[in-house]
Image: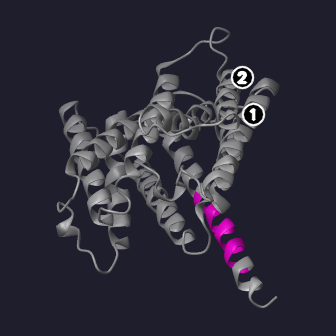
Amino acid sequence: MRRILPGFRGVTKAILLALLAYAVWAWGDGFTKSLGGELPVFEIVFFISSFSALTIILTRPREERWRDFWRMERPWVIQVRAAAGVISGFCGVYAFTTIPLAEAYALIFLAPLFITVLSVVVLRESVGPWRWAAVVAGFAGVLLVVRPGFRELHLGHLGGLTVASMFAISQILLRSLASRERYTAMFGTGFLYNITAYGIVAFAAGFVVPDLSQLARLATIGICSASGQIILLRVARFAPANVVAPMHYSQIGWAVLIGAVFFDEVPDGLAFVGLAVLAGAGLLTLLREKVRLGTVQWNPFIRNRV
């Protein structure tokens, strides 16, 4: 019993930390939504990336140095992943600031299902009927939430869909990088791309100086983005990914709560059913990966945040 208890405590701690991380991310997304219409989107993501970089730069492994981030074994793969992160960051902020949070999350949470499809097309992996059923169910869930043809669609919906696809591409690329590249190379390149690309466009489009309230919210979002990532990196020490990955779906609950309380966005009955179906499809995908490989292919500990 004494041998099992520390492991149990470790898993419990990991689950609680994962729930905290996803709550932090959800509240950061809520603050992002509050800036919609107040500042240009590129400017929002520029500040978020800058504050996030300042926070996460302190997390490098002791044996690595940030000035060595340019030393890479597969530079082109890292560049493509960083470019996907730039696109994902912009589209994510655009989606959060233009459509209801629950709808944005429904589209973004298609990411693990897209990964299943890409694993077949790109990596030539074998996918069984259970995982294909999860893909179909996931799309059905999103259709119940968004209901194209029955309500007006916006570019924000396309933004959420783009985030899911870019994240899936990023994770597929990460499989070939995680064991071969430095932490500083993967994260340093991503932040450099984000700050440079967003900064150039933000200043070229006419920079708007944020007031103190806006600056405080931008700093909060950046800190939330980095803190969630730091917390989940710590979670990896206590439990394997497949134990805590389902906690990601707690963000759907936060999206409904934050949207309803602060933005008067209350999903109807069909939307709630769709969110439940989507979460179930994602969980089914994770469970099948646990049975097949003893792990999961969607690694929530290295999520491509802004």
Q: Quadrant of the N terminus?
A: bottom right
**Relative to 27, is 42 on the left or the right?**
left
Label placed on residue 277: 1
Image spot of residue 26 (x, y percent): 59, 49
For the residue labelled by badge 1, is the local secondary structure a helix, a strand or a loop? helix
Residue 204 lies, with reference to residue 299, above or below; the image says above
From the top left corner, tell me how far across and down residue 44 is, in percent. 37, 42
**In this rendering, does residue 209 appear at all?**
no
Q: Closer to the camera: disc 2 or disc 1?
A: 1
In the rendered view, tell whether residue 243 sits above or below residue 10: above
Cα separation, mark 2 vs mark 1, equals 9 Å
- In the image, residue 22 lies at what x, y percent? 60, 55
Q: Residue at x 46, y 55 (%)?
A: 225
Of mark 2 and mark 1, the one earlier in the sequence is: 2
Q: Find the residue positioned furthest to the top.
A: 149
Verify CB contact (< 8 Å) between mark 2 and mark 1: yes
Q: Which residue is mark 2?
A: 144
- Sort mark 1 into few (<14), some (14-19) or many (20+) by Cα contacts within 10 Å: many
In the rendered image, the vertical position of residue 83 relative to residue 186, given as above or below: above
Residue at the spot 32% in from the left edge and 80% down from the top edge: 62
The stretch in magenta equals 9-21
As for residue 12 lying within the magenta part, the answer is: yes
